[in-house]
């Protein structure tokens, strides 16, 4: 259907715009401007594309181990969703849908959010080319790592460290402190 094609196209543009935050993007559809993005830092770009609330309820990620680097932004445990549709994972700037990476993301949030809730995340993993095989799937959306336990350890350890550092922050606490508008 045209609506499904439009949604798929918009999703593809979002993934590309996240992977290349240093590049500006403009998307027009049926004569209407749908999206305009100036070059920006990755966390700012992700917030622009997913939800502006991520500026307040997000945590920047930047960690490295064994020649690998993980950057991006994740949501506070108290700022989560009922579906995993706001999780974007990249390996060497390539958008992927990989069970190992998704499992590591879930593992980092284990015991912090309910099983049926999902964090918002855009994670960028940089791995030496010889450590990853991108030719696993015809669409190149799946990857295979030479040392999957090292990749999982970097993600779970890096995210848990960042979450622990921000353990005093809460999206729920901020919402509870907001003024309430009463109606009669």
Image (spheres, rainbow, N blue to C red):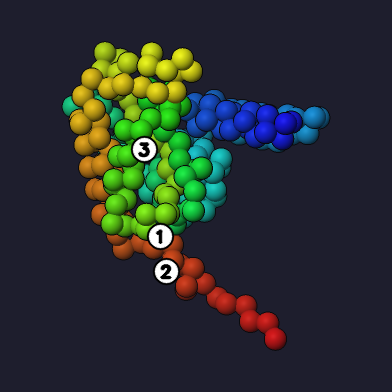
Residue beneath label 1, please? 78
Residue lying farthest to the bottom in this orientation? 184
Q: CA distance from mark 2 to mark 1?
A: 9 Å
Q: Residue at x 52, y 30 (%)?
A: 15
Residue beneath label 3, please? 102
Secondary element at tag 2: helix
Q: Residue at x 50, y 40 (%)?
A: 46
* Image: 179 above or below 22: below
Would you say the residues marked 2 and 1 are in contact, meaning their CB atoms lie under 8 Å apart? yes
> Would you identify the image quadrant in which residue 94 lies?
top left
On the question of residue 17 being in view, the answer is no
Q: Which mark is residue 173?
A: 2
Among the two numbered marks 2 and 1 on one chain, the one whose residue lies closer to the N terminus: 1
* Image quadrant occupied by the N terminus: top right
Q: Around disc 3, counting alpha carbons within 10 Å, would you say few (fewer than 14), some (14 to 19), or many (20 or more)?
A: some
Q: Left or right: 35 with respect to 139?
A: right
Among the two numbered marks 3 and 1 on one chain, the one whose residue lies closer to the N terminus: 1
Secondary element at tag 3: helix
Q: CA distance from mark 3 to mark 1?
A: 19 Å
Secondary element at tag 1: loop
Q: Disc 3 or disc 1, which is closer to the eye? A: 3
Q: Residue at x 43, y 38 (%)?
A: 122
């Amino acid at each position: 259907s045209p609506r499904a094609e439009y949604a798929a196209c918009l999703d593809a543009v979002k993934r590309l715009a996240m992977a290349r935050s240093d590049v500006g993007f403009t998307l027009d559809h049926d004569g209407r401007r749908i999206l305009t993005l100036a070059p920006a830092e990755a966390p700012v770009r992700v917030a622009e594309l997913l939800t502006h609330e991520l500026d307040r309820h997000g945590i920047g990620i930047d960690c490295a181990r064994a020649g690998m680097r993980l950057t991006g932004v994740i949501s506070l445990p108290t700022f989560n969703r009922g579906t995993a549709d706001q999780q974007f994972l990249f390996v060497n700037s390539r958008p992927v849908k990989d069970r190992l990476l998704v499992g590591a993301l879930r593992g980092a949030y284990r015991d912090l959010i309910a099983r049926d809730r999902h964090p918002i995340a855009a994670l960028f993993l940089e791995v030496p080319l010889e450590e990853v095989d991108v030719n696993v799937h015809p669409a190149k959306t799946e990857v295979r790592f030479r040392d999957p336990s090292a990749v999982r350890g970097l993600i779970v350890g890096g995210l848990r460290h960042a979450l622990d550092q921000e353990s005093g922050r809460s999206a729920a606490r901020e919402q509870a402190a907001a003024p309430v508008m009463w109606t009669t």
